[in-house]
Amino acid sequence: MTDRLDTRGHVTLRLTDRAGRIVDERRRRNRIVLSGRFMIAELFSETTSPPGPISHIGVGTDGTTPADDHEALLAPRGARREITERDTERLTERTEDREEVVRVRVSLTAIFDYDDANGTEPLREAASFNGEEDGVMYNRVVFEPVTKTDAFRLTLLWEVVF
């Protein structure tokens, strides 16, 4: 028997109009970048100050495919938004050889309200960070363009499975 940490994640983007109707919803897999993997590895090291938790999500306009060496959004727009909801749950999966493995799913939600991150150039990227301005980027995702205006609220629901 062997055990592997197959960490993976995805983000759900949801645009809601002022009447509360969901007008668009998309789901995309993310890339856990090298800085994010180092962040997790530091939790096991003798570091005097372990990294803080993922606390913010940012958005931007660059659609470049995520790469391991990305440490920030490539074209950020507006301030990062604080994570407003957190949830952790167990789930059971089967491996390729039919063995059951209990995983842990962490769900994080941030909301870009009607007046946040608006502009004529569409949003195409998002990432999670352990800081409001600086901090380490854990993961990054690109998606089909979303034009964010004050007519919509953008909710990002990020799920990471360990």
Image (spheres, rainbow, N blue to C red):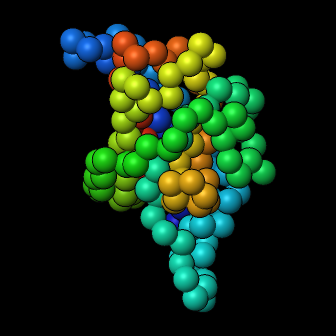
**Is residue 148 or residue 70 the one in the foreground?**
148
Q: At which x and y percent is residue 86?
A: 30, 52
**Is residue 119 or residue 62 the one in the foreground?**
119
Residue under the image location 70 percent in, 26 percent down:
63
Q: Is residue 155 visible?
A: no
Residue under the image location 65 percent in, 26 percent down:
61
Q: Quadrant of residue 43?
A: bottom right
Q: Is residue 43 above or below residue 97?
A: below
Q: At which x and y percent is residue 57?
A: 49, 44
Number of numbered discs overlaid on the protein picture: 0
Q: Is residue 135 above or below residue 13?
A: below
Q: At which x and y percent is residue 127?
A: 56, 43
Residue under the image location 37 percent in, 48 percent down:
83
Residue under the image location 55 percent in, 83 percent down:
49
Judged left or right of residue 69, residue 23 is: left
Q: Is residue 105 above or below residue 59?
A: below
Q: Is residue 55 above or below residue 108?
A: below
Q: Is residue 118 visible?
A: yes
Q: At which x and y percent is residue 2?
A: 54, 67
Q: Residue furthest front?
A: 115
Judged left or right of residue 75, residue 43 is: left
Q: Quadrant of residue 23?
A: top left
